[in-house]
Structure formats: structure tokens, C-alpha cells
Amino acid sequence: MKSRQDHLKKLKSGEQYDIVIIGGGANGAGVVLDAASRGLNCAIIDSYDFASGTSSKSTKMAHGGIRYF
């Protein structure tokens, strides 16, 4: 598993992405999962802990499991 530093190096390397998702909540994780499954080169950026800020009533039930996508 890559470290946070490894991921940051890759983002700074100048590699081009087909899609960049800002926010790792349930919607962001779902979008990046769908895009990656379609073969797009994706990056997801979250300010703190991936899926930690999910608070919408519609996603509270899935919140715990979203970390394990």
C-alpha cells in the first residue's frame, strides 16, 4: 500500500488525469469508483481523513463502509 507521501509525489509529478474529484465523501468515492471502473485515470483529493466528513442523512448508513471501497 502506498504511503500518503507516495500519493502526493504522484499528484505533483505532472501526470495528467482524466478526472480529479475534490472531496472523499460518499458521492466523491462513488464517482471515482465508477470512473475508474470505466478505465479513466482518476485522482481523489480529501482534506483530512477519507470519508470522515460524510454527514448527510442519505449517506450516514453507508458512511462506515465507504472507507473500504
Image (cartoon, rainbow, N blue to C red):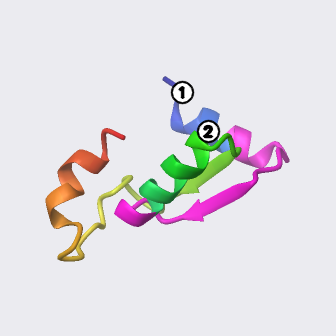
Q: Quadrant of residue 30?
A: bottom left
User: Rounded to the nearest whole Å, what is the CA distance between mark 2 and mark 1?
Assistant: 7 Å
Helix, strand, or loop for circle 1? Answer: loop
Taking the magenta stretch, the answer to whether it contains residue 14 is yes
Residue 64 percent location from the top left of the image: 19, 50
Crowd class of label 1 (few under 14; some 14 to 19; many from 20; radius 10 Å): few
Q: Are marks 2 and 1 in contact (CB under 8 Å)?
A: yes
Residue at 67% across, 40% down? 39
Residue at 85% across, 47% down? 14
Task: Judge whether 15 appears above or below 54 on screen.
Answer: above
Q: Which mark is residue 30?
A: none
The three-letter code of the residue at mark 2 reads His
Crowd class of label 2 (few under 14; some 14 to 19; many from 20; radius 10 Å): few
Residue at 62% across, 44% down? 38
Left or right, 16 with respect to 4, comes to right
Q: Quadrant of residue 52?
A: bottom left
Residue 66 percent location from the top left of the image: 29, 49
Helix, strand, or loop for circle 2? Answer: helix
Mark 2 sits on what residue? 7
Mark 1 sits on what residue? 2
Residue numbers of the magenta segment: 9-27
Residue at the front extreme, as displayed: 38
Task: Judge whether 2 appears above or below 4 on screen.
Answer: above
The three-letter code of the residue at mark 1 reads Lys
